[in-house]
Amino acid sequence: MVQLSRKATCNSHGQVSSYFLGWEEYEKNPYDVTKNPQGIIQMGLAENQLCFDLLESWLAQNTDAACFKRDGQSVFRELALFQDYHGLSSFKNAFADFMSENRGNRVSFDSNNLVLTAGATSANETLMFCLADPGDAFLLPTPYYPGFDRDLKWRTGVEIVPIQSSSTNGFRITKLALEEAYEQAKKLDLNVKGILITNPSNPLGTTTTQTELNILFDFITKNKNIHLVSDEIYSGTVFNSSEFISVMEILKNNQLENTDVLNRVHIVCSLSKDLGLPGFRVGAIYSNDKDVISAATKMSSFGLVSSQTQYLLSSLLSDKKFTKNYLRENQKRLKNRQRKLVLGLEAIGIKCLKSNAGLFCWVDMRPLLRSKTFEAEMDLWKKIVYEVKLNISPGSSCHCEEPGWFRVCFANMIDETLKLALKRLKMLVDDENSSRRCQKSKSERLNGSRKKTMSNVSNWVFRLSFHDREAEER
Amino acid sequence: MVAFATEKKQDLNLLSKIASGDGHGENSSYFDGWKAYEENPFHPIDRPDGVIQMGLAENQLCGDLMRKWVLKHPEASICTSEGVNQFSDIAIFQDYHGLPEFRQAVAKFMEKTRNNKVKFDPDRIVMSGGATGAHETVAFCLANPGDGFLVPTPYYPGFDRDLRWRTGVNLVPVTCHSSNGFKITVEALEAAYENARKSNIPVKGLLVTNPSNPLGTTLDRECLKSLVNFTNDKGIHLIADEIYAATTFGQSEFISVAEVIEEIEDCNRDLIHIVYSLSKDMGLPGLRVGIVYSYNDRVVQIARKMSSFGLVSSQTQHLIAKMLSDEEFVDEFIRESKLRLAARHAEITTGLDGLGIGWLKAKAGLFLWMDLRNLLKTATFDSETELWRVIVHQVKLNVSPGGSFHCHEPGWFRVCFANMDHKTMETALERIRVFTSQLEEETKPMAATTMMAKKKKKCWQSNLRLSFSDTRRFDDGFFSPHSPVPPSPLVRAQT
């Protein structure tokens, strides 16, 4: 056996997680309306595919940017050779402006504080390399994106300490939970270098509130040497941009711009979600710390953005009329699609966490669990993937500590596919209800334990109430 | 003071050691030359006295062929009216296996650049963000922090960053000498291996660049076999950086490690890996296409997962897939590229010969290894750096000193010749001519002063002896046999 590195042989790339297993199952049996109508529908993919017609229309009218041309003249040579890790000025300027526009122009961004990376994955890893040494820790509110176990930990040697949250308060960050996570890290003898939040949240689909942000900023103001990284790659998916508060707005509004806190706040952004272009691999780090910018710029050599892509997107993002219309239409379509999923789920008796952003819903399937355990969650998940044939992501893969929550994506498919998914899910719920009726009957007949009977009665009442609602809607 | 110290400590604690340290290697004079160039870049009209960039190993000789192809094939871009029907499929594609047609096209191109003597399996191709990303990925896969790779000197300065910075891996030099044309010998390998052992550095592999950067030489079959046998016997990995595979010209033949392992029966292929990119062979560094090709299934799997940190833009994958699938174009491109490289190489070597400046005989790469040992005041790296500063700041050529490539002997410089047009090359040669003429003039007046003459005579006598020694080596054939080397200007002056 040839000996490889520990990083190559251990599983900290995280791909044994059920999040990735679902993808593998999908790839074996992918749904296609004509070729494979019984296949697995991909609802584990947080991609924004709702506005390609707008992009394609823009391309048709802007042929120069598409063909390595400027004013009709070829720029192929300079683009083919361009590998300056500072990036094309025109692209970075356009990117910075787009970031401002995404935030309702309430803050502005200096393109000199931007470092381009080959996607958000690369941006997050680069920041970890810049801010932490192996064995240092970052505090992350749960639930969080499963890919972070790879992006933040795998090659950097950084540890993640979860900030616990609860559905009783909508999974919000609390001062108590933050302090507890910090103490937990200390007990584990881990040096805490920062907090990383995703705002808007993946998988919750909620924006971080003013209250939560104040808790975080109070914490890093009090505890020097602690960074705050805000992954804002879903900033353009907020249904109403006034509801999104960037960490840069907090710095500005709380008069922290002339304090040391300024240098300890960093943003990760990308065009994968806002523009629906994950294949183009465009990510960025925004920081006011010159040392971070300097180191991250050098590290970006390991994964630069293609100059071809930079050139195309600098033209696209410089078209202010287009970006304004795009953002408005994008938000509208996302909101409409989200409503279709939420209402469709309600119609079959399934609730979602109330949300205002993202490409997914955080779906509450706790009533469908046979017990309040992660084993029961996995049983349900397997049924959904293998029998119902929907690839959704179990909450445990997002480190949610309450079993029964699932992330369901809605923006990577057409309306008809979403309807089909809901139809399939309805059959599952109906089957589960039938199964529980038989269970109840058998239980009564066999004089089951009081506790078990009580549990079944509760479930039955819960189910009944949903049937009542369905009748009303009908 | 206490407060200051505390604040300083806090500042240092804010960032990681990797971010605070010098592991990025950009304090090397290799990069200082670039900074000098960037502060005062030559332009034939706007800035005719600026620094000429000869520290950039880029292939810009065939950009016109590429441009013509792009104009003729709008469907290769998913963003044109001809190709837009594929836009949405390509734009969302982020599978780290890469577009199948891209990997197939790259595999075919790799075969062509090795004269179709080997076959490459597209399923073993892993994308990376350029060769830089590819090297880091391989280092992460094969080695733990503190482990070491043997690297023959001189080697590309960027390796100190790519392979060491974030991985914590050590590079152990395999010292090569000009006395045998910087060949890699088994003795040198064994010596390096032993040095690593004594330093408690576990050796995980050997990294060779073939064709060599900065030498421009290619490894012959016997040498490659000895390398494979060495790594096989030691049970360590062999990483072949072949990013200059298609830059051979003239009668030179490039032999890939992929070809050699077919001839070695007991070769453990799990130990063999190739790093490749399109930056040099096709002159497309801006598109950031790097490749890890491994015969080790496990390395392929892990490298693919790591490629998420530096995937190639799907827009670019699509373009490259179309371009490299055009076999007629590719064949013509490779042929023309070699012709142009040969012509440019001949131009600069003829110019240097005419000035009495030596260079290592080689037939590959985008650069040559220039011998300025005769111009050093002393055989030291301080003297090399001093001369280099004169060349960059006064002669205004950004050439790269051998010391930054970890060359064992001071006085060698890498000079790039494929990143400029013909006129700029002529300007560069003219500047060198003026420089050597001035140097020649400066040696004359000194003889007139008795006391100075004694000191200087002593100094020049020392150089004279060195010159004779070098002349004998020149006769050994390390310089082009068709270009007789005139004596050094210094020797002529003495005479």
Image (cartoon, rainbow, N blue to C red):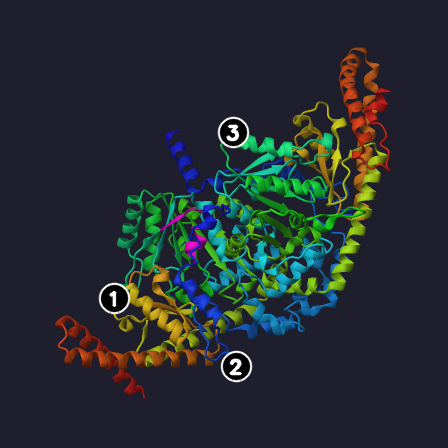
Circle 3 sits on which residue?
Answer: B198
Please indicate whether residue A119 sits to the left or right of residue B386 in the image. Answer: left
Magenta residues?
A147-160
Quadrant of the rendering where the C terminus of chain A is positioned: bottom left
Q: Are marks 3 and 2 in contact (CB under 8 Å)?
A: no
Q: Are marks 1 and 3 in contact (CB under 8 Å)?
A: no
Q: Verify whether residue B179 appears in magenta.
A: no
Circle 1 sits on which residue?
Answer: A372
Which residue is painted at 42% across and 43% down in the image?
Answer: A134
Residue B381 at x, y percent in the picture? 66, 27
> Which three-letter amino acid code belongs to the residue tagged 2?
Thr
Q: Earlier in the sequence, mark 1 or mark 2?
A: 2
Circle 2: element type: loop
> Which three-letter amino acid code belongs to the residue tagged 1?
Lys
> Which three-letter amino acid code belongs to the residue tagged 3?
Lys
Which residue is painted at 43% across and 48% down in the image?
Answer: A262
Front-lying residue, A213 or A351? A351
Label 1 to label 2, Cα distance in Å? 39 Å
Chain under numbered label 2: A
Labels 1 and 3 within one chain: no
Label 1 to label 3, Cα distance in Å? 58 Å
Circle 1: element type: loop
Residue B204 at x, y percent in the picture? 53, 41
Label 3 to label 2, Cα distance in Å? 66 Å
Residue B205 - label: none
Q: Residues within 10 Å of mark 3 (few under 14, many from 20)?
A: few
Residue B209 at x, y percent in the picture? 65, 43
Circle 2 sits on which residue?
Answer: A34
Q: Verify whether residue A151 appears in magenta.
A: yes
Residue B259 at x, y percent in the picture? 68, 50
Tell us which disc is closer to us: 3 or 2. 3
Image quadrant of residue B454?
top right
